[in-house]
Structures are given as structure tokens and as C-alpha cells.
Image (spheres, coloured by chain):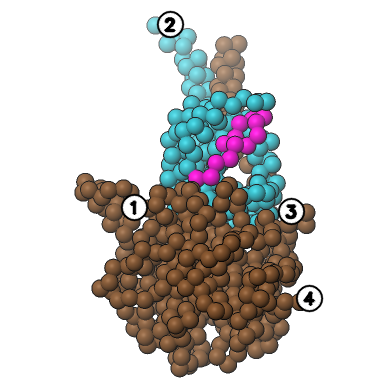
Amino acid sequence: MSLPSRTRPEARWRTQALGLAAWLLLAAAPAQAKRQVEAFDRQAWAQLQASLKTPALVVFSTTDCGHCPAVLAQLAAAPERKRQRAPLIAVVMDQAPGEDDSGLLANPHYKRADRVFAFQGQAAALRYSVDPGWRGITPYIALLRPGRPVQWVLGPPQAEDLAAWTRSRPGQ
Amino acid sequence: MTTRLHRLCAAFSLAATLLPAAWAQHGGDHAAAAARPAKTGKPALAVGAAFSPAGELWLSGLDEQGRLFVQRSADEGRSWTAPRLLDIAGEKPVADGENRPKIAFGPQATVVISYTRPLAKPYTGEIRMLRSTDGGASFGPPFTVHADRQVITHRFESIAFDARGVLHTVWIDKRDLELSKTAAAQGKPTGKPYRGAAIYRNESTDGGASFGPDLKVADHSCECCRIALSPTPEGGMAALWRHVFEPNERDHGFALLQGAASEPPAAPVRASLDRWAVDACPHHGPGLTPAEGGGYHAVWFGLRGGEAAVRYGRLDAQGRPLGAVQALPDAGAEHADVIAAGPELAIVWRSFDGATQSQRLRAWLSSDGGRSFQLRELAATGLNNDHPRLLRHGQRLYALWRTQEQIHVIALKNSP
């Protein structure tokens, strides 16, 4: 049988190549699965907006904000977000990075977020860097699109807020 | 060979495509975040403060390790004793602006310190108390103040002794919300969803040795704002809190803390008329102090006609708005407190100055019971800081502000 003798080395190459690809994917998997609490410092807001390549939703929250879990759940499930593959980002204002990261990441409400930040630095200055007029009321939600001004919502976004976010285009 | 190379390259190409995608999903500034300064916990700067009968200023708060301490000053805050740690069996109190350890002095050398201990579930807690009967020289072990022991919200307590020596503890409580949720889950008719939380209280007539039953003050409070307490002219205690009025307006409710367990709570008096409709947490509780000649001075934060401001107004003896309401002369004012001694009236707040990137402690002082005010700059910091507090010792008024650098204690006089 000639077929096995011809295909054996090719099969070996294929196996090796696929094995390498699988190894690389496995190596990548922990990086994807492992979340960490990122520092939200005075540059973070500008950097976040500058690095924006897709629409995104940012929820500013506190650990004692009773209204925040429902908003995180609402936005995590929002079809408008899913359609645009917009990441959901939570920014916790009353807990610093390193204070209780594992507790924060294990919190079922924050598990819904693709990224979790925590305020690092003077809270008032950080709030001012985000929006000088914001008085710390939570949840405060930024509906972001690249090239568009921030669309702010205080409390649960209404259907028209999300529709406007979905419709907006650069320059509008 | 070419085929083999193509396939190997294809495998690498696939991996090269997927790897950055995996990283990108986690965050584009991953490396930048990792390169940032060493992570440190946010300092828990929120403190309670009170003058002892002997005239010493006492603080209760958390140190850098989150341990409960007391500290005293015999010279109006110019110098302080070393912090004295209190044994609370390893409990981890909350100390954030609106929810801080409190200290109160009662009759017969009684001192009590209260704090909220978070429980295992998010948003839950119980109110704990330490008690001293020797003027604060020693404290007994912590105990839970309320009768209800469910793992639910009992948080944002306020404590005060009235003129008769009765210790009042008032807190935000979600037992009625939980009942409503349970009933709804069981398919029982509940009507509309329960709005907000509830205000509960109890009384101790023996300086915290024992407590009466949990008494409901009002249904439908806001969930995360401090409760203001003020002595009444009759020697009792009054409370002001952010309330969720029908249909969904976060104004302020006022109630006199009186009445027995058998009496249903009276509807709270509406003390502010901002009509702020929002499903959010302002994290901004009000301030309340008795006014000379009757009624009260109050300060609160809210949105009125779309304008966010801290406002000052007078309330009558029943807590109803009286006369014109004034916004403080600072668009960035937040977390104001108010106190009076006769015609002397002080309002303090903090305000962020974007130009200097610092937070300022400012005051509005009146010597005519609030008819006219002078604006004063008291202090500033570029670091984290607590909400400012006001204290009264005899006829003298003081502002107290703990920042990451120091504890400011400023005697307030209506002239520079």
C-alpha cells in the first residue's frame, strides 16, 4: 500500500503544525481567561478613549451602589451591545487596585464586565478627569463610539439612549 | 516541502491572529496598566468625631491596616494622642465617606462607637457597637445593635444621645424590600415593586447596655446616603434622610424619632422639593441642626430643574420647608454639613478645583441665623480626603477634615 508511505510524513507535519497551533492557543487561553483589576488613574480615561477601536460601554460604580448591579446586567444583556461587540467596562470608585481584587473579580455583578478598573489616586481628581460636572452619582454610564463625543447617562439607560448610541456615527 | 511550509505558516498565522485577539479582548493598555505604580489600598479616611464632656476631642476611624482606633486631642486638634487600637476581634469595618465609624458620649461616663461590618453577601451588613462605661478608658467587645439578624442591608447608621440620655441608633434596612421580593417570587400579589430601602431605628435607655425593638421610621428611603440626626428643642431627636417619594423622586424625609413599637410609622414629612427623579445612588446624605427660635437648618444635595447643587434651607418644627432655598455659592460643592449655636451658623463642604487639581474645604458662615453669610476658605489638599464634619463644643463651632496628610480642626469664627 503506497498511500500510507506517502502520507505518513505529511501527517506527521500536519500533526506537528496543529500541535504547535494548539499549544499556542492553549498558551493564549489563560491570558484571555485571566482578568485583573486595572488601575484607573488620571490618564486612564483619556487613554481609554484614545485606544477605542469599537463602541464600548463604561459603567462607573461603587461597591455599595444598589442600582449598579441591575445596570451591569442590563448592559451585559443588551442586544445593542452584543450586535456591536462592544466591551462592557466597569470602573469601581471606592476600592483601589490591590485592595480586594479577587473579591471584586469574583463579585457576580462585576463578572459581567469584560474589563474591571478601580480608581487609583484622589477620587475627586479622577472624577473631574472623567467629567468635571459629575458629582459622583452612580451608576454613571458612558456610551462610547470611536470619534464621537461621550454620551452620558445617569442611572439605567433607556431604550432611546442605546438606540442613539447605536445610530451615532463619527462627526454626528 | 512547499506544502508543509504553507501549512506550518498557516498554523503560525492562525495562532498569530488569535493571540492578539485574545489579548486585545482583555484590554489594549494591558502593558501600560502593568507598568503603573505599585498597587496600594485606598486609605479609609472616614472618621467620626465628638467632644467628650471633659472637652477633649475624640476621633474614631480606621488606620492604614483597616483597624479601628480612637484618638484624643486636648487642645482642639493641635496635638493628638497616639491612635489606640480597639479590640474588635478582627472585624473589618466600613469607613467610606457616607458610612464611617461614629462616636458618641452619653451620661455617666458612657461612650459608644458604632460601625458597619460588611457580611458575606454584597450590599449586606450589620451595625456593630462598642461600649465604654469609664469614659473611654476601656471598651467592651462589639455587639450587634439591631434585633434583625438576616444577611441583608443594615448599614449607614447614625447614633446620638438626646438630652434625656436616650441613645438613638438609626439605619438603612432592606428587610421590607427582601420581604417584597420573596412575596413576588412566590407569586403573591405585592402591587408595585418596593421602592428603595427603609429607615429603622431603636432606642437604648441604659447607654447601650440593652436596646428596645427595631422600629420602622419609614418605608422607601434611598439606599446609600447617610442619615442626619439633630436634637429637638423638646430634648428628643429628629432625623433627615434622602427618601424616594412617589412616584420616584429622591427628596428628603424628616421624622421625629418618637413613638412606640405598637404605633405604625407616620408618613415622613417632605423636607425638600427638588423633585429629582433618578434611579441612581447620589452618595450624598443631608445635614440637619436646630435653629434658634425653632425649626431647623438643613443642607442637602440634589438636582432641581436640572441644576445639581448643594442647597441650604430652613425647616419648620415639623420638618416642612420654610422660606427660600439657597444654593451654596460653589457649583462644585459636595458633602456639606451644617451646625448652629444660637445665631451662629456654619455650613462646610468640599469642592474640587480643576485649576489647582486640589480639593478645598470651604465654609459659609452666618452670625444672624442664616440671613446673611460670609464665604471662607479653610484648607485644601491634593490627596484623598474625608467628607468634612462640623462639631459643637459649648457655643464654639469647629470644622474637622481628615485628609491623607493630616487632621484639620478649624475653629470657626465669622471673621477672617
Where disc 2 sits, the SS reads helix
Residue B111 at x, y = what percent? 48, 86
Can you identify the residue that label 3 sits on?
Answer: B354
Residue B153 at x, y = what percent? 39, 62
Q: CA distance from mark 3 to mark 2?
A: 80 Å
Q: Residues within 10 Å of mark 2 (few under 14, many from 20)?
A: few
Farthest residue toward the top? Answer: A2
Q: Are marks 4 and 3 on the same chain?
A: yes
- Nearer the observer: mark 1 or 2; the answer is 1
Q: Quadrant of residue A165?
A: top right
Can you identify the residue that label 1 sits on?
Answer: B194
The residue depicted at 65 percent of the width and 89 percent of the height is: B74
Where disc 3 sits, the SS reads loop
Residue A39 at x, y = what percent? 62, 50
Sooner in the amino-acid sequence: mark 1 or mark 3: 1
In the picture, measured across the screen, residue A140 lies left or right of residue A1, that is right
Residue type marked 1? Tyr
Indicate which disc residue B416 carries.
4
Seen from the viewer's position, the closer of residues B48 and A16 is: B48
